[in-house]
Image (cartoon, rainbow, N blue to C red):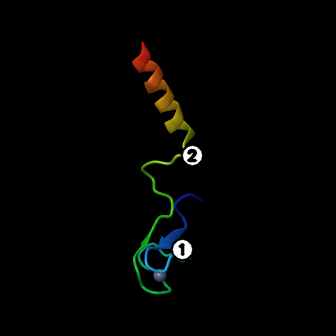
Amino acid sequence: MKGLLMRCASCKRYTLQREKCPHCGGAVKSPHPPRYSPHDKYAMYRLKARLEGEEG
Ligand SMILES: [Zn+2]
């Protein structure tokens, strides 16, 4: 499911189109940035491991 739904950067409407918005023709992009998520539990584990590692 992740990455299936795109969102128009112009009119903010959701679409399944990946190249351009069918509503206004604007550029679409993923509403879920793949680089980092505050809800990524693995990122939390990495941060925790890094902080603990710096102590020792
Ligand atoms: Zn649009």
Which callout, 2 or 1, points to the residue nearer the camera? 2
Q: Which mark is residue 16?
A: 1
Crowd band around label 1 with a 10 angstrom C-alpha radius: few (<14), some (14–19), many (20+):
some
> Is 9 rendered above or below residue 22?
above
Crowding at dot 2, Cα within 10 Å, few <14 / some 14-19 / many 20+, comes out as few
Mark 1 belongs to which amino acid? Answer: Leu
Amino acid at dot 2: His
Residue for point 48% across, 25% down: 49
Q: Quadrant of the N terminus?
A: bottom right
CA distance for labels 2 and 1 = 24 Å
Q: Which residue is mark 2?
A: 39
Position of 9 with respect to 45 (left or right) is left
Q: Is mark 2 within 8 Å of ligand 1?
A: no
Q: Where residue 47 appears, x then y in whole percent?
A: 47, 31
- Circle 1 — which element? loop
Circle nearer the N terminus (2, 1) = 1
Is residue 39 rendered to the left or right of residue 53? right
Q: Along the horizontal axis of the image, is 19 left or right of 16? A: left
Residue located 45% across and 48% down the image: 36
Relative to residue 18, is residue 47 depicted above or below? above
